[in-house]
Amino acid sequence: MVTTVGTENSAEKLVQNLLHLEHDAIAAYESTIERLDDAEHSAQIETFRQDHLNHVAQLEKFAADLGIEAPSGGDMKQMMTTGKVALADLVGDEAIINAMKTNEDDTVQAYEQASDNTVADGQMRPIFLQALEDERRHRAWMETVTTR
Ligand SMILES: [Fe+2]
Ligand SMILES: [Fe+2]
């Protein structure tokens, strides 16, 4: 799926949609973390979940600065390619991690778009670039597991 998150034409909408996307991503992580067989995989995915919590905290600060309400969950129209419900049906670490990788494609693309978006101010851009780096690192690790 090609995500449009990150292409919004106001900073308010941009921050709101990134928060929806992050909450969807965290829900997907949570629905799979305990179902992974390999404890090392779970531990790794848990560190990635912490990165996402950190992204949420920073986005919430931007929401407060903008004087808007920070969404505390995902959007009705599920933003991830493979959301928590679809993930719950998968069995086996490779299948689960491969599906999660499709979500990292979405978050990578969203932060690429967000960091290029002219509605993002000088405070937001470095934070979006840092998040982009995190999402790329998550995806790279998932690729090493699924192509092993
Ligand atoms: Fe994130
Ligand atoms: Fe991620």
Image: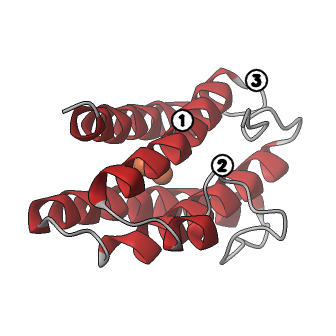
**Image quarter for residue 16?**
bottom right
Disc on res. 105: 1
Cβ atoms at labels 2 and 1 below 8 Å apart: yes
Label 2 sits on what residue type?
Answer: Thr
Q: In the picture, which quadrant includes the N terminus?
A: top right
Determine whether, in the image, residue 95 is placed left or right of residue 119.
left
Q: CA distance from mark 2 to mark 1?
A: 9 Å
Give percent across and percent down for residue 11. Answer: 79, 44
Q: CA distance from mark 3 to mark 1?
A: 22 Å
The residue that disc 2 covers is 81
Eye-nearest disc, 2 or 3: 2
Give percent across and percent down for residue 131. Answer: 44, 41
The one of 126 and 1 positioned closer to us in this rendering: 1
The one of 125 and 27 positioned closer to us in this rendering: 27
Mark 2 or 3 closer to N-term? 2
Label 1 sits on what residue type?
Answer: Asp
Residue 119 vertical placement versus 49 (above, below): above
Q: CA distance from mark 2 to mark 3?
A: 26 Å
Total count of labels: 3
Residue furthest right in the image: 9
The residue that disc 3 covers is 118
Determine whether, in the image, residue 40 is placed left or right of residue 148.
left
